[in-house]
Amino acid sequence: MDLSRRRTLTLAGAAATALTVPLALPLAPGAAAATTSAAADDPYEALLARAEQQLTGGAFDPADPDFAGALDALDAQAADWWGRLDASAGRTALWADLSPASDPGMFGQSYQRLRTIATAWATPGTSLTGDAEVLAGLLDALRFLNAVGYAPARSESGNWWFWEIGSPRALMDTCVLLRDRLPAADLDAYVKTVARFVPNPDRRTNSPSLAETGANRADKAVIVALRGLLGRDPAALALARDGLSDVRDSSRNSLFRYVTSGDGFYPDGSFVQHDVVAYTGTYGSVLLGGAGQLIALLAGSAWAVTDPAVGVLHDAVDRTFAPVLFDGLMMDAVRGRAISRERARDHTDGAVAVSYVLQLADGAPQSYADRWRAAAKGWILRNTETPYASLVGIPALARAKALLDDPAVSPAERLTGHFVFADMDRVVHRRPGWACALSLSSKRIAAYEAGNGENLHGWYTGDGMTYLYDGDDLDAFGDGFWPTVDPHRLPGTTVDTRPRTDLGTGGGTGTFRPTNAVAGGAVLDGRYGAAAMELIADGSTLRAKKAWFFVDNAVVALGSGITASDGRTIETVVENRNLHAGGTQRLTVDGHRQPGDQGWSARLTDARWAHLEGSGGYVFPSGGPLCALREERTGTWRDLNTGADTGGSTAPVTRRYATLWFDHGTSPAAASYAYVLLPGATAAATAAWSRSRPVRVLGNDAGVQAVASPRLGLLAAHFWAAGTVEGLGCDGPGTVLVRRRDDGVSVAVADPGRTATTLTVELPFPVRRVVRADDTVTVTPGRRPVLTVHVGGSRGHTHTADLI
């Protein structure tokens, strides 16, 4: 793709101030000597100067056109809020829409606006830069909030986050920017206020028995560090540094420690927050950014982070984040309730994560840094639909400019492979032109999180929702998808069509975990995969056994045992593709072009294949009946999110959709389905695939769901009970993949239900000897070789062996 550095960096738009957590930057050229000198006299001021640079971007030329868009966006937002700020004597709020300022949600957002104004005041090249009136207004506004809103004498109410993270972070950032102009008494008052609500990074202030974990711990460590610098408090700085490693509790909640349950990074690349939610794309990203920022802020000082276990954070970039970043966007399957935030699209959260990766690269070992910069350059250059520069502020833009200007860094190609995140019930399959993500759930991992008015319609997002990402259409889920899609017809799901009420309308957040055990799968040779999920529907008698098989450029989806007794229609959604505002993409079924009129629908009794222009092909091995619909849908972001600081607008959003689904009828008994996704395939290729069937369905019932690809020598099955298919046997529930080639045999086995101690697998062909096997795998070679796989305690992870 031919995209110049200049074009990428000048396509900045109104979201350029989207990064509310600032990014650490290397010191400006020529500043090292001055910093060393300052450190000798005042180590706090040296680090405060660095913190200010993290907020403003440091030394840059405001006349450089590469920064024009981000600078204009910052200026426009700050000037708008400055122009509307209420400075009257009898005010009850700083802004009319954030009234009263005594409410935690209102003063929390007020501090964030003041930070933006202060950033523009301290950044060269804006209309507010160095303005004395603006400075006076900021000082007055801070006093007002401290008097009526955020003050030590008050007790926490409402959402704890505003008291312990949102407000103190924005307040400390603002104080960093204004520190030379803040009266000593004011600064002391603000530092004491923050010390009252964030005394350390280790505990929740409003619930002292609750230890902070994950992203919340990282956020609080940064806050404590900033108040330590502003208050010249070495003990606070030590608390901040030690908080990352959880020195207080012997590393139990260290951010540099792998976990096997609860919040944090898992060895398989999973990231969980709120104990049971797959949250790589939001909380995981915040952790990466906060920890990375603090490491950079304190580097070279008496409080430098020296924990040797920081390598866990480095490994997470490759293991946790890279698989779920597609051309710089963050997959929605790992963004939790953030999918309902109008101002936090997949592109926005992706840009934040990319910026944090580049931040961490500044202080990482060279082998890591080189790899990350190459990956980031590819992510930035490939996303031309929503350019990176339109999503980030000046600090991140400065890094991107340096990276894109560096001829020594070649952009990496898209990551390919198959990834099973067993510890968060997610699966990602990546090919050169597309990616597929599965969002599963179980009694271990929530189907959804909702609360504080967010994610009101997330009912089915964890029921096997299948996200297809196409390199030629990066906006499938980011372009008004969530407020306009039919939430009962999410791709990949099998649903009871019952009416639902809004989720999470009250205070606090909550999750729903179904009671099923099976969710997950196995990966073979890092390239092929099989996954399964037992569906036990929420508030319904609906039950189903669902499986997916990932074979190079195809995804085979099977369903069996679909049963319900509530007198309602049950559907399985093959596709519900966002065609954008005026989409007229052609839909072809069995070679016949279907009508393009909005509102058109059909019941296709014996469909064998379909093709949707710009998306790809769909093959139906068992035929129809297939239902199809074209429709134009209108909704608002407010329908999904009424949160205090994330609530959506009431402006109507309209998008067109092409939907394909199976209607299993009313209260079905043991219904089934089979379909194949061929992302990016042409109509001709889809028709040819339907005729030749390079992947065959071998079983789709209550005992086993299985497929075979003779060309690849691949046999893949999920056994719901002991059984045999095509000579491949398993003595209990589990997922098995076998690939036989001229140079040997590879086998992968997993127990996604986590119910067995051992699984015994019998292969359908002879094996002479073992080339390599995991410690958990014992092989008895012979004409009918047997593998004994010790799956107990492995938490659903894959066990492998190579044979000959």
Image (tube, grey):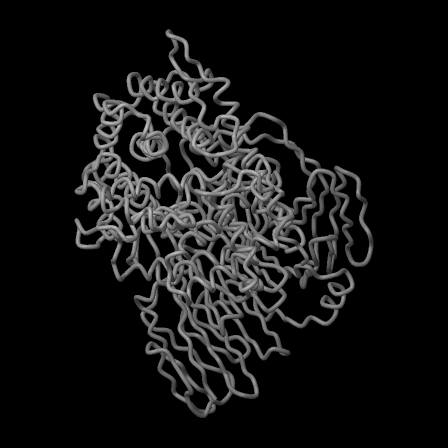
Residue at the spot x=49%, y=59% of the render?
A: 373
Residue 403, image x, y percentages: 52, 55
Q: Is residue 717 above or below residue 28?
A: below
Residue at the spot x=26%, y=46% of the render?
A: 39
- Is residue 653 visible in the rendered image? The answer is yes
Q: Is residue 453 above or below residue 663?
A: above
User: Is residue 181 shown left or right of residue 98?
Assistant: left
**Residue 588 found in image quarter:** bottom right
Residue 604, image x, y percentages: 75, 51
Residue 288, image x, y percentages: 38, 50
Residue at the spot x=52%, y=80% of the render?
A: 727
Q: Quadrant of the N terminus?
A: bottom right
Counting labels gives 0
Camera-side residue: 189 or 602? 189
Residue 458, image x, y percentages: 49, 40
Camera-side residue: 670 or 359? 359
Camera-side residue: 595 or 500? 595
User: Is residue 576 shown left or right of residue 798?
Assistant: right
Q: Is residue 518 above or below residue 330?
A: below
**Residue 269 found in image quarter:** bottom left
Residue at the spot x=61%, y=26% of the render?
A: 651
User: Is residue 86 shown left or right of residue 211?
Assistant: right
Camera-side residue: 598 or 126? 126
User: Is residue 772 shown left or right of residue 546?
Assistant: left
- Is residue 514 visible in the rendered image? The answer is no
